[in-house]
Image: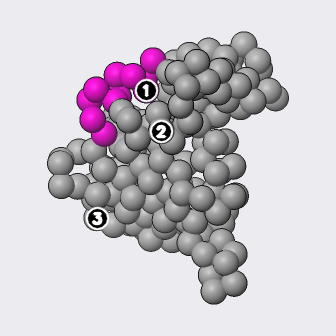
């Protein structure tokens, strides 16, 4: 990604894309018509631990924004890293009606750190098996964060 790029998308409550900007279309390699209505995980890279997305959805369920480094996969099998901010879109009664995501270029130094963490999380997921994968990788991450004496958000924003 370029320094001034922002990938913007909006989804409904089930994760179906309802809006995507031209930068999202460019980097994903999909056309707008292919993205609209598709599950946002159409760009999920297999190197991403399932626990990261569980954490994201758990955070959004609390009506809180979530920051994360994410490795996305483009249509041609290539990949691109982003620093993502995902926020619930609340209606007038304060209920989520969808989600906004704004992504920008990830710092190379952050990618190096996060890549190692994600590899370790994926190893925990493989050990635990599909049923317990998310809980196992999140427990591992929680232990690491406690050792560092920081919250998830403090850690991510410090990279």
Residue where numbered disc 3 is placed: 22
Farthest residue toward the front? 149
Boundaries of the magenta span: 106-116
Q: Secondary structure at mark 3?
A: helix
Q: Which residue is mark 2?
A: 154
Decide which of tag 2 and tag 3 comes sooner along the chain: 3
Point 69% across, 49% down: residue = 58
* Placement of 22 over or under 124, stated as above or below: below
Name the residue tied to disc 1.
Answer: 114
The location of residue 125, given as percent across then percent down, is 68, 21
Report the predominant secondary structure element of the magenta stretch: helix
The vertical placement of 84 against 126, above or below, is below
First in residue order: circle 1 vs circle 2: 1
For label 3, count other residues whose C-alpha is less than 10 Å away and answer few (under 14), some (14-19) or many (20+).
Answer: some
Q: Quadrant of the N terminus?
A: top left
Q: Work out whether residue 35 or residue 136 is closer to the camera in this orientation and state it.
A: 136
* Labels 3 & 1 near each other (Cβ < 8 A): no
Pair 1/2: label in front:
2
Residue 70 placement (x, y as % from top left):
44, 39
């Amino acid at each position: 990604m370029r320094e001034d790029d922002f990938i913007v998308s909006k989804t409904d409550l089930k994760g179906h894309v309802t809006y995507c900007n031209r930068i999202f279309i460019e980097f994903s390699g999909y056309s707008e018509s292919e993205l609209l209505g598709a599950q946002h995980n159409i760009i999920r890279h297999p190197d991403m631990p399932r626990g990261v997305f569980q954490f994201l959805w758990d955070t959004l369920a609390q009506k809180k924004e979530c920051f994360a480094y994410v490795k996305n996969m483009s249509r041609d099998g290539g990949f691109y890293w982003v620093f993502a901010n995902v926020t619930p879109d609340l209606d007038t009664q304060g209920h989520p009606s969808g989600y906004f995501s704004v992504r920008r270029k990830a710092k190379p130094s952050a990618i190096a750190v996060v890549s190692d963490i994600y590899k370790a999380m994926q190893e925990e997921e493989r050990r635990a098996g599909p049923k317990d994968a998310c809980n196992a990788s999140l427990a591992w991450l929680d232990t690491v964060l406690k050792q560092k004496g920081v919250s998830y958000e403090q850690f991510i924003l410090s990279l």
